[in-house]
Image (tube, helix red, strand yellow):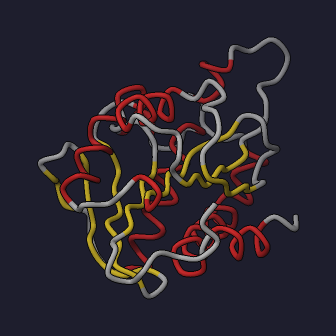
Amino acid sequence: MPAEPPADDVPMLVVGLGNPGPRYVANRHNIGFLVADEIADRMGGKFKSHKAGADVLEGRLGGRRVALAKPRTYMNLSGGPVVGTARFYKVPAENMIVVHDELDLPFGNLRLKLGGGENGHNGLRSITKSLGTRDYLRVRFGIGRPPGRMDPADYVLRDFAAVERKDLALEIDRCADATEALVAKGLEAAQNLFHAR
């Protein structure tokens, strides 16, 4: 497991997962897009349409060269644009960070990891299948379990609850901090910073 960040001359790809279009903007499933938008603000740039099927911003984050991407496909087809973008920028899987929602963590909890299963997440499943490996970095943003007997597929496509929206901007900011730390310091150091809570 790489504890150190990659050499500066090797670019990194940071991918925020979500669904395109105004209907999905504030959904729990779109937390990856919301975090990517916050990171884009920090990088001081704007996303541009890329031939790989993603909106991409090139720049520097945490002192490193980064391509920040939001696939323009629906979540379950994220793999094609992600792999296309990675190939274009010559980014190996181990230098890829995917920011996504996580049902198995309470709201706002963050966990950083390398590899592992997809836990039923269709975006991750698509990326793993297209990449041919699970060995990419993930920033998992907790959205909690659905209440009662609600279908998880319905739950992730609902907007955050009013009580969650109160803290959402702060949690997005913290998730962007964690992603930046992962880029700048590597997995182990970033975990030590953000797994305390």
| Above/below status of 85 relative to 21 | below
Can you say which quadrant of the picture contains the C terminus?
Answer: bottom right
**Nearer-the-camera pick, 120 or 166:** 120
Q: Please report the residue visible at 61 percent of the width from the left and 19 percent of the height from the top.
A: 154
The image quadrant of residue 73 is: top left
Can you say which quadrant of the picture contains the N terminus?
Answer: bottom right
Q: Residue furthest front?
A: 1
Image coords of residue 174 (percent x, y)? 67, 69
| Above/below status of 191 relative to 71 | below
**Nearer-the-camera pick, 188 or 68:** 188
| Above/below status of 108 relative to 68 | above
Image coords of residue 196 (percent x, y)? 87, 68
Q: Residue 17: in sight, yes or no?
A: yes
| Above/below status of 52 relative to 170 | above
Q: Please report the residue visible at 46 percent of the width from the left and 70 percent of the height from the top.
A: 39
Q: Please report the residue visible at 42 percent of the width from the left and 81 percent of the height from the top.
A: 7
The image quadrant of residue 3 is: bottom right
Image coords of residue 147 (percent x, y)? 82, 23
**Nearer-the-camera pick, 182 or 23:** 182
Image coords of residue 26 (percent x, y)? 52, 43
**Nearer-the-camera pick, 73 or 164:** 73
Q: Residue furthest left?
A: 51
Q: Please report the residue visible at 41 percent of the width from the left and 28 percent of the height from the top.
A: 129
Label tally: 0
Q: Residue 44: in sight, yes or no?
A: no
